[in-house]
Image (cartoon, rainbow, N blue to C red):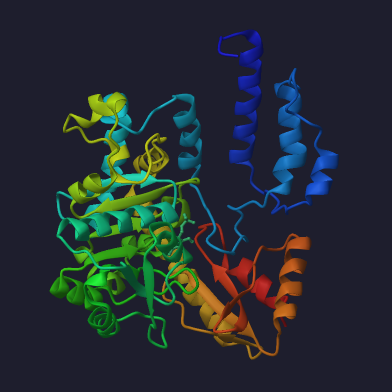
Amino acid sequence: MHETTTENEAALDLVLDYSRKRLTARDLPLDKSVSSADLRRLAPPAVTEDGIGAARALAVFEHVLAPACITTDHPRYLSFIPSAPSKAAAAFDIVVSASALYGGSWLEGAGAVHAENEVLRWLADEFGLPAGSGGVFVQGGTLGNLSALVAAREDARGRGTAPGRWAVVCSAEAHSSIASAARVMDVDVVAVAPGEDGVLRGDAVRAALDEHGERVFAVVATAGSTNFGIVDDLAGIAEVTTERGTWLHVDGAYGLAGRLSTRRREVFAGLEHADSVIVDPHKWLFAPFDACALIYRDPERGRRAHTQHAEYLDTLTETKDWSPSDFAAHLTRRPRGLPTWFSLATYGVRAYREAIDAAIDLAAEIGRVIAGRPELSLVREPQLSVVVFERVGWTKADYDAWSARLLDEQLAFVTPSSHRGRPNARFAIVNPRTTIEDLTAILDTMS
Ligand SMILES: Cc1ncc(COP(=O)(O)O)c(C=O)c1O
């Protein structure tokens, strides 16, 4: 299994040839999921005492398993938050695996950690965070939010606060991962109503802090809500958290990429006051799954909360080295920031800004088209690159049937959403290959 043999080289060729074909294909189908019964029938057992060999296993993957997975980087995949890795980023993920890199400690992975830190430094500068800020790439936004909130609570504990129950304040439209983190941490969520426009503002946060006092160890502001792409009033919220000395965490898993744009910089004013932020390169920064950049204003506060201590780790923890494992709820880690590093190095930051601008412009353009069609109505004006709209007269069942038809016909993947109990349709646009023609063709199916 581990020697360089003719057989292993042949397996490697097969895998690299497949990867090249996938990464250079011009017109991939959307594909769709298949029932478990069908997969059991179509895919022969591969995990057997003798194995089935690389060629057969790859054939099963190529012809049965891969087509049963939706193409998340397809230009007409517009559900949830799509993925759109650049060619360079996706290709470099192969290098990361091939190199058996360990990204947990400086001792073992200094070169990889240096490159990841270059990306984190660049992001921190773009976000207006101070020179000492830094962090780590974790698996995803959920783990990034959890790790930041654990650090925030540890920080509050370190200052001697000891309420009966801790609480975190966030918008009622914050991502579900905040509630998930609160469950894991066994703390309460104080969900504050945002304005009609979906924006959480400082006065509402102030009222929540007045009511819940020192129980509150962190306020979470969302920079680009998942449902609408709306950015909370970061400046107004930061004014309150600064005044009260409460940790401000900014969840920008999807939307903080918008800060790189030349279009919407002003909506992120106040970001520079955050104690911690996250942004997911696997969303709108063109990296493959899975990568979330978690940055602390003062990384020591992250380190104090998260460093694991054990005899066999003393070699690592007794030094002052920068070890990424120390900054989140994890130990072993792949240096998952490297594909982003390679992609940024390949294309330059300007290409990123332009691609993000293009998504924002496209969202605005399709928003105007929707507003101009009598059978459609926008639920809210798009702010970044999420567009939510209703088809007049449609029930939830109509949206469900329409969405299933789009996928059956391989036209698009657009899952229905809802707002305050009313069903709607939602385009999440991050893929630079998505065109206005793609989107209008989908709208045409609703008339
Ligand atoms: C605003 C926001 N926060 C957190 C998350 C969770 O990120 P992940 O799915 O990478 O765990 C998402 C995912 O869409 C999100 O949009």
Left or right for 240, reference 360: left
Nearest the camera: 104 or 167? 167
Which quarter of the figure is the C terminus placed in?
Answer: bottom right
Residue 60 in sight in this render: yes
Residue 371: quarter of image: bottom right
User: Can you give x and y, in whole percent of width and height, for residue 178 in the image?
Assistant: 41, 64
User: Can you give x and y, in whole percent of width and height, for residue 167 in the image?
Assistant: 32, 69
Numbered label tally: 0
Residue 263 in sight in this render: no
User: Can you give x and y, in whole percent of width and height, for residue 270 in the image?
Assistant: 22, 70
Residue 108: quarter of image: top left
Q: Which residue is drawn at the image coordinates 70% and 85% (left, top)?
A: 394
Which quarter of the figure is the N terminus placed in?
Answer: top right
User: Can you give x and y, in whole percent of width and height, for residue 74 in the image?
Assistant: 61, 54
Residue 336: quarter of image: top left
Q: Which residue is drawn at the image coordinates 81% and 33% (left, top)?
A: 44
Nearest the camera: 320 or 96? 320
Nearest the camera: 251 or 165? 165
Q: Residue furthest front?
A: 164
